[in-house]
Image (spheres, rainbow, N blue to C red):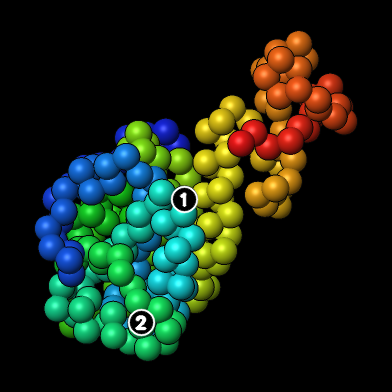
Amino acid sequence: MGLRINDTVPNFTAETDQGTIQFHDWIGDSWAILFSHPKDFTPVCTTEFSAVAQLNDEWAARNTKVIGVSVDGVEDHKKWKKDIEAYGKATPGFPIIADDGLAVSKAFDMLPAEAYLPDGRTPADSATVRSVFIIGPDKQLKLSMTYPMTVGRNFAEILRALDGLQMSSKGVATPANWVPGEDVIIPPTVSNEDAKAKFGEFETIFPYLRKTKAPS
């Protein structure tokens, strides 16, 4: 059974290029994004890790830690980071988990339980290890998405989704294509009277669709 929204994510101990971590302790009181890749030194993944590095200040501004997962070892991760920095012109300061035994990939249900990777494996052998998990400070899964190997992830959208999740934790919802600064949606479970008391003025578009200024 795969992880579902609001499930507590697996805790694990793993080696990274920055040392050993215990996942829940590493998250601490922060939000966290775990993003996985099929193999080091692959073209799409190099561009993606570079995009993540370019957003270092944005993650920090949102109290969010990012961590990569790849099925190769620590020494490969360290060498690969040189390519990542050269391509993106930004330092990849986040850790990368060395999931060469597939323990993390299996714990997060990114591979079948019986999966194994033979010696001399290629990226195709671990093609399904390519997911994003956004995790709250409560260690619960808030969002997940999985991409094929041939389509690079849009980390601007992942950042936008993170903003939406953090906004929705204030008791509202966000409409399609919402970005910070735009109005938000009052949940249908909140009465007009309670909405007035909590949010002040709001716009009623339909009885079930009411918008208000985003709470600070």
Which disc is residue 14 wearing?
none
Is residue 197 placed above or below 83 in the rendered structure? above
* Three-letter amino acid code of the residue under disc 1: Arg
Residue, x 71% and y 15% (percent of image)?
Answer: 197
Front residue of 147 and 1: 147
Residue, x 47% and y 45% (percent of image)?
Answer: 143
| Quarter residue 85 falls in | bottom left
Residue 161 at x, y percent in the picture? 56, 51
First in sequence: mark 1 vs mark 2: 1
Mark 1 or 2: the one toward you: 1
Secondary structure under the numbered disc 2 in the rendered image: helix
Residue 104 at x, y percent in the picture? 23, 54
* Three-letter amino acid code of the residue under disc 2: Ile
Is residue 92 rendered to the left or right of residue 195? Answer: left
Residue lying farthest right?
205
Residue, x 28% and y 46% (percent of image)?
Answer: 27
Can see residue 185?
yes
Which disc is residue 84 wearing?
2
Is residue 205 placed above or below 160 in the rendered structure? above
Secondary structure under the numbered disc 1 in the rendered image: loop
Which disc is residue 62 wearing?
1
Is residue 216 rendered to the left or right of residue 75? Answer: right
